[in-house]
């Protein structure tokens, strides 16, 4: 598995439904981009200009919501991951 650096976080994104409510199979370009997922790895945190390290707020196992077009997508063994900065996470789902 990858180890994120700094304030980056790796999230396993949730799969979108393959069919609509009416049972119509959706093409890949018609599906919405996922905006939720589970944190699988967290970096050490970001370093401020004065040298202090700020620890990440999220932790492994948290379910989070993130900005729609944030991060870099990575595919591995039929799983979709997203590497993004912690600032692109908008909420932790409890």
Image (spheres, grey):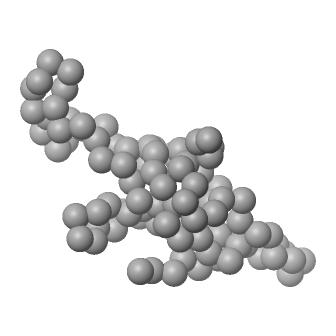
Q: In screen coordinates, is 44 left or right of 48? A: left
- Residue 58 vs 69, above or below: the answer is below
- Residue 87 vs 18, above or below: the answer is below
Work out which quarter of the rendered image holds the C terminus and state it. Answer: top right
Q: How many marks?
A: 0
Q: In screen coordinates, is 94 left or right of 11? A: right
Q: Residue at x 44, y 44 (%)?
A: 35
x then y, percent, for residue 37: 45, 51
Q: In this view of the protein, which residue sits in the foreground, 90 or 23?
A: 23
x then y, percent, for residue 30: 20, 35
- Residue 57 vs 28, above or below: the answer is below
Question: Where is residue 60, by image quadrant?
Answer: bottom right
**Does the image show residue 6?**
yes
Q: Residue at x 28, y 67 (%)?
A: 75
Q: In this view of the protein, which residue sits in the foreground, 55 or 50?
A: 55
Work out which quarter of the rendered image holds the N terminus and state it. Answer: bottom left
x then y, percent, for residue 36: 46, 45
Considering every residue shown, the one lying at the far right of the view is 50
Q: In this view of the protein, which residue sits in the foreground, 14 or 88?
A: 14
Q: Residue at x 11, y 24 (%)?
A: 23
Question: Where is residue 57, by image quadrant?
Answer: bottom right
x then y, percent, for residue 44: 68, 77
**Does the image show residue 84?**
no
Considering every residue shown, the one lying at the far top of the view is 22
- Residue 26 vs 11, above or below: the answer is above
């Amino acid at each position: 598995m990858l180890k994120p650096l700094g304030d980056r976080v790796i999230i396993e994104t949730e799969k979108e439904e393959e069919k609509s409510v009416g049972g119509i199979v959706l093409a890949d370009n018609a599906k919405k981009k996922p905006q939720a997922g589970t944190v699988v790895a967290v970096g050490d945190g970001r370093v401020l200009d004065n040298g202090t390290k700020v620890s990440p707020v999220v932790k492994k196992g948290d379910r989070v919501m993130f900005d729609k077009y944030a991060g870099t997508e990575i595919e591995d063994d039929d799983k979709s991951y997203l590497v993004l900065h912690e600032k692109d996470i908008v909420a932790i789902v409890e």
